[in-house]
Amino acid sequence: MRFIWRKEHVLIFLLIIFYSIGAIGAILPSTSRWFLSLTPFNLLLTFSILVLAKKNRKIKFVIFLILAFIIGISVELVGVHTGLLFGNYSYGESLGLKFFDVPLVIGVNWGIVAVAASSIMARTNFGLITKVLLSAAVMTILDLLIEPISADTGFWYWKDNLIPIYNFICWFITGIGIQMIFYRLNLEEKNKVFEVLLLLLFIFFTLLNAYYQ
């Protein structure tokens, strides 16, 4: 049977290419720093692919991503400058342009992770609260994978190199807030692009953990 390329297939192919090359480049000693410096561009490309991949309610989806950006930047500003959220940490240079010491792509990242984390819930018959809690839990698990290599990659640094449990509590609570907006806007849909992205994020950070640890 002849395989017909659709937009969905193209976007999945692009994601696989981006993250495969990124993973290889990030773990090769000769190229790791350069590839890690491209993280903001990778996040922006991922963001663009998510918007293109959304099947329904695109305007609401963009509104959601903007709200996720605002929430993400806001909690990070509080965290970086007061330590009242997440703990005592500061951002490195790998994530690019900063706004009051917080990289702008961090706001983009909150939206990306939220969409990816919620993707598998569309395959279930769980109720709203369960989906919100599980999606927030998946977001937190992703952060659990990122934290051990955050300093090695130049993403961010924890005071005394200690990652507090409080960080994950804040991630979970913030995730709940963002997921509530996602589901209240009725943005859930079965979307293979979102599901593949979630898988790639787990593989990508698992590989980086294996290399840096």
Image: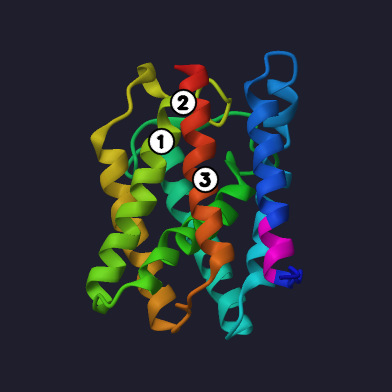
Q: In this rendering, is residue 66 above or below 146?
A: below
Residue placed at 65% from the left, 42% from the top? 19
The disc, 3 or 2, on the residue closer to the chain's N-terminal end is 3
The image position of residue 56, as x and y in percent, is: 58, 85
Q: Is residue 36 magenta?
A: no
Is residue 100 rendered to the left or right of residue 116? Answer: right
Q: Are marks 2 and 1 in contact (CB under 8 Å)?
A: yes
Residue drawn at x 68%, y 14% as measured from the top left? 29
Residue hosting label 2: 209
User: What amino acid is found at the position of numbered circle 1 in the picture?
Assistant: Leu
Give the extent of the magenta segment.
8-12
| Residue in view at x 46 percent, y 47 percent | 76
- Magenta stretch, overall SS: helix
Q: Quadrant of the N terminus?
A: bottom right
* Residue 138, percent from left and from top: 35, 53
Looking at the image, which is closer to me, 160 or 188? 188
| Residue placed most toward the observer, 62 or 138 | 138
Is residue 48 visible in the rendered image? The answer is no
Q: Earlier in the sequence, mark 2 or mark 1?
A: 1
Amino acid of disc 3: Leu
**175 on left or right of 108:** left
**Mark nearer the N terminus (3 vs 1):** 1
Residue under pointer 3: 201
Q: Residues within 10 Å of mark 3 (few under 14, many from 20)?
A: some
From mark 2 to mark 1, how far is it between C-alphas? 7 Å
